[in-house]
Image: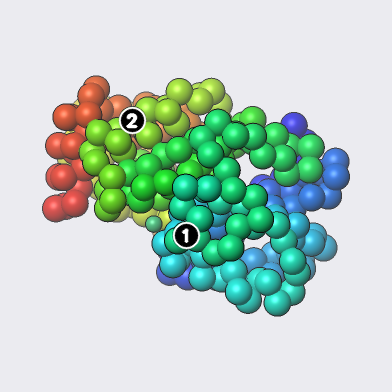
Amino acid sequence: MNYEILTIPCLTNNYAFLLHCNETGTTALVDAPEAAPVLSALNAKGWTLDMVLLTHHHWDHVEGLPDLLKHSTPIIVGAAKDAERLPKLDIALNEGDTLEVGNLKGRVIDVSGHTINHIAFAFPGAVFTGDSLFALGCGRVFEGTMDMMHESLQKLAALPPETMVYSGHEYTLDNAKFSLTVEPENAALQVRVKDVGRMRTADIPTVPSLLSLELATNPFLRAKDAAEFAKIRTAKDNF
Ligand SMILES: [Zn+2]
Protein backbone atom coordinates (compact mmCIF):
# COMPACT_ATOMS: atom_id res chain seq x y z
CA MET A 1 0.00 0.00 0.00
CA ASN A 2 1.29 3.36 -0.99
CA TYR A 3 0.08 5.92 1.50
CA GLU A 4 1.09 8.59 3.97
CA ILE A 5 -0.55 9.31 7.34
CA LEU A 6 -0.13 12.58 9.25
CA THR A 7 -0.81 12.75 12.99
CA ILE A 8 -2.33 16.12 13.89
CA PRO A 9 -2.56 17.24 17.53
CA CYS A 10 -5.85 19.07 18.20
CA LEU A 11 -7.52 20.69 21.24
CA THR A 12 -5.88 19.68 24.54
CA ASN A 13 -5.02 16.04 23.88
CA ASN A 14 -6.92 14.88 20.79
CA TYR A 15 -5.43 13.54 17.59
CA ALA A 16 -6.85 13.77 14.09
CA PHE A 17 -5.19 11.96 11.18
CA LEU A 18 -4.86 12.64 7.48
CA LEU A 19 -4.72 9.48 5.38
CA HIS A 20 -3.43 10.22 1.89
CA CYS A 21 -3.40 7.78 -1.02
CA ASN A 22 -0.23 8.53 -2.95
CA GLU A 23 -1.54 6.86 -6.12
CA THR A 24 -4.76 8.86 -6.51
CA GLY A 25 -4.05 11.90 -4.31
CA THR A 26 -7.21 11.20 -2.31
CA THR A 27 -7.08 12.50 1.27
CA ALA A 28 -9.28 11.43 4.17
CA LEU A 29 -9.41 12.99 7.62
CA VAL A 30 -10.10 10.66 10.53
CA ASP A 31 -12.13 12.56 13.14
CA ALA A 32 -12.54 16.32 13.26
CA PRO A 33 -11.75 17.69 16.72
CA GLU A 34 -10.72 21.11 15.41
CA ALA A 35 -10.49 22.71 11.95
CA ALA A 36 -7.47 25.04 12.13
CA PRO A 37 -4.66 22.48 12.64
CA VAL A 38 -6.20 20.21 9.99
CA LEU A 39 -6.45 23.07 7.48
CA SER A 40 -2.84 24.09 8.04
CA ALA A 41 -1.66 20.49 7.61
CA LEU A 42 -3.64 20.21 4.35
CA ASN A 43 -2.19 23.52 3.21
CA ALA A 44 1.38 22.58 4.03
CA LYS A 45 1.01 19.36 2.03
CA GLY A 46 -1.01 20.88 -0.81
CA TRP A 47 -3.71 18.24 -0.23
CA THR A 48 -7.48 18.66 -0.72
CA LEU A 49 -9.86 17.19 1.83
CA ASP A 50 -11.93 14.56 0.00
CA MET A 51 -13.38 12.52 2.85
CA VAL A 52 -13.96 12.68 6.60
CA LEU A 53 -14.19 9.39 8.51
CA LEU A 54 -15.90 9.66 11.91
CA THR A 55 -15.26 7.07 14.64
CA HIS A 56 -17.98 8.19 17.05
CA HIS A 57 -20.29 11.07 17.91
CA HIS A 58 -18.49 12.73 20.85
CA TRP A 59 -18.08 16.49 20.43
CA ASP A 60 -14.28 16.37 20.53
CA HIS A 61 -14.29 14.15 17.42
CA VAL A 62 -16.79 16.09 15.28
CA GLU A 63 -16.74 19.72 16.39
CA GLY A 64 -14.26 20.88 13.77
CA LEU A 65 -16.43 19.67 10.91
CA PRO A 66 -18.59 22.79 10.28
CA ASP A 67 -15.48 24.96 9.84
CA LEU A 68 -13.85 22.37 7.58
CA LEU A 69 -16.98 22.36 5.39
CA LYS A 70 -16.50 26.08 4.74
CA HIS A 71 -13.31 25.23 2.83
CA SER A 72 -14.24 22.04 0.96
CA THR A 73 -17.06 19.56 0.50
CA PRO A 74 -15.68 16.20 1.63
CA ILE A 75 -17.71 12.99 1.71
CA ILE A 76 -18.70 12.33 5.34
CA VAL A 77 -18.45 8.71 6.46
CA GLY A 78 -19.66 7.15 9.71
CA ALA A 79 -21.63 4.38 11.37
CA ALA A 80 -25.06 3.75 9.85
CA LYS A 81 -26.44 2.73 13.23
CA ASP A 82 -25.35 6.04 14.78
CA ALA A 83 -26.54 8.30 11.95
CA GLU A 84 -28.92 10.18 14.26
CA ARG A 85 -26.15 11.35 16.57
CA LEU A 86 -23.50 11.98 13.93
CA PRO A 87 -23.23 14.89 11.49
CA LYS A 88 -25.10 14.23 8.23
CA LEU A 89 -23.48 11.20 6.58
CA ASP A 90 -22.90 10.72 2.84
CA ILE A 91 -21.74 7.14 3.36
CA ALA A 92 -23.22 5.13 6.25
CA LEU A 93 -21.37 1.92 7.07
CA ASN A 94 -21.88 -1.23 9.12
CA GLU A 95 -19.41 -3.70 10.56
CA GLY A 96 -17.61 -5.62 7.83
CA ASP A 97 -18.32 -3.02 5.16
CA THR A 98 -15.40 -1.93 3.05
CA LEU A 99 -14.44 1.65 2.40
CA GLU A 100 -12.21 3.05 -0.32
CA VAL A 101 -9.92 6.03 0.15
CA GLY A 102 -8.49 6.31 -3.34
CA ASN A 103 -6.84 2.93 -3.92
CA LEU A 104 -6.72 2.16 -0.19
CA LYS A 105 -9.28 -0.39 0.96
CA GLY A 106 -10.41 -0.25 4.58
CA ARG A 107 -12.79 -2.36 6.63
CA VAL A 108 -15.22 -1.22 9.31
CA ILE A 109 -15.00 -2.84 12.74
CA ASP A 110 -17.70 -2.26 15.36
CA VAL A 111 -15.86 -1.38 18.57
CA SER A 112 -18.81 -0.46 20.77
CA GLY A 113 -18.17 0.09 24.47
CA HIS A 114 -16.97 3.69 24.92
CA THR A 115 -20.10 4.54 22.93
CA ILE A 116 -22.55 2.19 21.25
CA ASN A 117 -21.89 2.07 17.49
CA HIS A 118 -18.37 3.41 17.81
CA ILE A 119 -16.45 2.15 14.76
CA ALA A 120 -12.80 1.65 13.85
CA PHE A 121 -11.38 1.82 10.33
CA ALA A 122 -8.84 -0.92 9.54
CA PHE A 123 -6.58 -0.48 6.53
CA PRO A 124 -3.66 -2.76 5.69
CA GLY A 125 -0.98 -1.69 8.16
CA ALA A 126 -3.04 0.98 9.94
CA VAL A 127 -6.13 0.98 12.14
CA PHE A 128 -7.91 4.12 13.33
CA THR A 129 -9.42 3.30 16.71
CA GLY A 130 -10.90 6.58 17.99
CA ASP A 131 -11.61 6.17 21.71
CA SER A 132 -11.66 2.36 21.79
CA LEU A 133 -8.02 1.20 21.93
CA PHE A 134 -5.42 3.74 23.13
CA ALA A 135 -1.66 3.44 23.47
CA LEU A 136 -1.34 1.47 26.74
CA GLY A 137 -5.02 2.05 27.44
CA CYS A 138 -8.60 2.01 26.26
CA GLY A 139 -11.53 4.39 26.34
CA ARG A 140 -13.85 4.66 29.31
CA VAL A 141 -16.89 2.43 29.02
CA PHE A 142 -19.62 5.09 28.92
CA GLU A 143 -22.46 3.47 26.99
CA GLY A 144 -21.68 -0.20 26.46
CA THR A 145 -20.91 -3.00 28.89
CA MET A 146 -17.53 -4.25 30.04
CA ASP A 147 -18.17 -7.46 28.06
CA MET A 148 -18.83 -5.42 24.93
CA MET A 149 -15.66 -3.35 25.30
CA HIS A 150 -13.60 -6.47 25.96
CA GLU A 151 -14.97 -8.06 22.81
CA SER A 152 -14.28 -4.90 20.79
CA LEU A 153 -10.66 -4.78 21.97
CA GLN A 154 -10.21 -8.45 21.13
CA LYS A 155 -11.31 -7.74 17.54
CA LEU A 156 -8.54 -5.14 17.31
CA ALA A 157 -6.07 -7.54 18.95
CA ALA A 158 -6.75 -10.01 16.12
CA LEU A 159 -5.45 -7.62 13.44
CA PRO A 160 -1.95 -8.33 12.05
CA PRO A 161 0.59 -7.51 14.81
CA GLU A 162 2.53 -5.19 12.49
CA THR A 163 -0.53 -2.88 12.27
CA MET A 164 0.01 0.68 13.49
CA VAL A 165 -2.66 1.86 15.93
CA TYR A 166 -3.86 5.44 15.40
CA SER A 167 -5.89 6.33 18.47
CA GLY A 168 -7.78 9.51 19.30
CA HIS A 169 -5.98 10.88 22.38
CA GLU A 170 -2.56 11.45 23.92
CA TYR A 171 -3.23 9.74 27.25
CA THR A 172 -0.18 7.51 27.15
CA LEU A 173 1.84 8.89 30.06
CA ASP A 174 -1.08 8.50 32.44
CA ASN A 175 -1.87 5.08 30.96
CA ALA A 176 1.76 4.05 31.42
CA LYS A 177 1.71 4.88 35.15
CA PHE A 178 -1.48 2.88 35.58
CA SER A 179 -0.24 -0.08 33.49
CA LEU A 180 2.74 -0.50 35.78
CA THR A 181 0.38 -1.01 38.74
CA VAL A 182 -1.26 -3.90 36.84
CA GLU A 183 1.91 -5.58 35.55
CA PRO A 184 4.87 -4.28 37.54
CA GLU A 185 7.03 -7.26 36.48
CA ASN A 186 6.40 -6.93 32.73
CA ALA A 187 9.86 -6.14 31.29
CA ALA A 188 8.54 -4.96 27.91
CA LEU A 189 6.18 -2.61 29.76
CA GLN A 190 9.00 -1.24 31.93
CA VAL A 191 11.01 -0.39 28.81
CA ARG A 192 8.00 1.16 27.13
CA VAL A 193 7.11 3.33 30.13
CA LYS A 194 10.62 4.82 30.04
CA ASP A 195 10.30 5.45 26.29
CA VAL A 196 6.92 7.11 26.75
CA GLY A 197 8.34 9.36 29.47
CA ARG A 198 11.21 10.43 27.22
CA MET A 199 8.89 11.06 24.26
CA ARG A 200 6.45 13.16 26.24
CA THR A 201 9.25 15.21 27.81
CA ALA A 202 10.37 16.00 24.25
CA ASP A 203 6.73 16.71 23.25
CA ILE A 204 6.77 13.83 20.75
CA PRO A 205 3.39 12.11 20.12
CA THR A 206 3.25 8.50 21.35
CA VAL A 207 0.56 7.84 18.72
CA PRO A 208 0.61 5.82 16.52
CA SER A 209 1.90 2.72 18.28
CA LEU A 210 2.60 -0.76 16.98
CA LEU A 211 -0.11 -3.35 17.72
CA SER A 212 2.50 -5.97 18.65
CA LEU A 213 3.79 -3.59 21.34
CA GLU A 214 0.23 -3.07 22.63
CA LEU A 215 -0.21 -6.85 22.75
CA ALA A 216 2.96 -7.11 24.84
CA THR A 217 2.29 -4.19 27.19
CA ASN A 218 -1.33 -2.92 27.20
CA PRO A 219 -3.12 -4.46 30.22
CA PHE A 220 -6.57 -3.84 28.68
CA LEU A 221 -5.68 -5.92 25.63
CA ARG A 222 -3.91 -8.54 27.73
CA ALA A 223 -6.82 -9.23 30.10
CA LYS A 224 -7.54 -12.96 29.78
CA ASP A 225 -11.34 -12.55 29.87
CA ALA A 226 -14.11 -10.00 30.24
CA ALA A 227 -14.13 -10.29 34.05
CA GLU A 228 -10.43 -9.49 34.29
CA PHE A 229 -10.88 -6.65 31.80
CA ALA A 230 -13.72 -5.21 33.92
CA LYS A 231 -11.53 -5.32 37.02
CA ILE A 232 -8.71 -3.46 35.27
CA ARG A 233 -11.04 -0.89 33.67
CA THR A 234 -12.71 -0.16 37.03
CA ALA A 235 -9.32 0.22 38.71
CA LYS A 236 -8.28 2.69 35.99
CA ASP A 237 -11.49 4.70 36.46
CA ASN A 238 -10.48 5.15 40.10
CA PHE A 239 -6.75 5.65 39.46
ZN1 LIG B 1 -15.17 9.73 22.97
Location of ligand 1 given as a quarter of the image: bottom left
Alpha-carbon span between mark 1 and mark 2: 25 Å
* Residue 104 percent location from the top left of the image: 73, 37
Pick the quarter of the image with the N terminus. Answer: top right
Q: Which residue is mark 2?
A: 151
Q: Nearer the viewer, residue 130 or 37?
A: 130
Identify the colour scheme used. rainbow
Residue 39: image quadrant is bottom right
Residue 132: image quadrant is top left
* Residue 216 percent location from the top left of the image: 37, 26
Which of pointers 1 and 2 lies earlier in the amino acid sequence?
1
From the viewer's perspective, tell me whether residue 76 is left or right of residue 228: right
Which amino acid, mark 2? Glu
The reply to whether residue 199 is visible in this rendering is no
From the viewer's perspective, tell me whether residue 85 is left or right of residue 103: left
Which amino acid, mark 1? Glu
> Please, is residue 185 above or below residue 91 in the view?
above
Dot 2: within a 10 Å radius of its alpha carbon, few (fewer than 14), some, or many (20 or more) residues? many
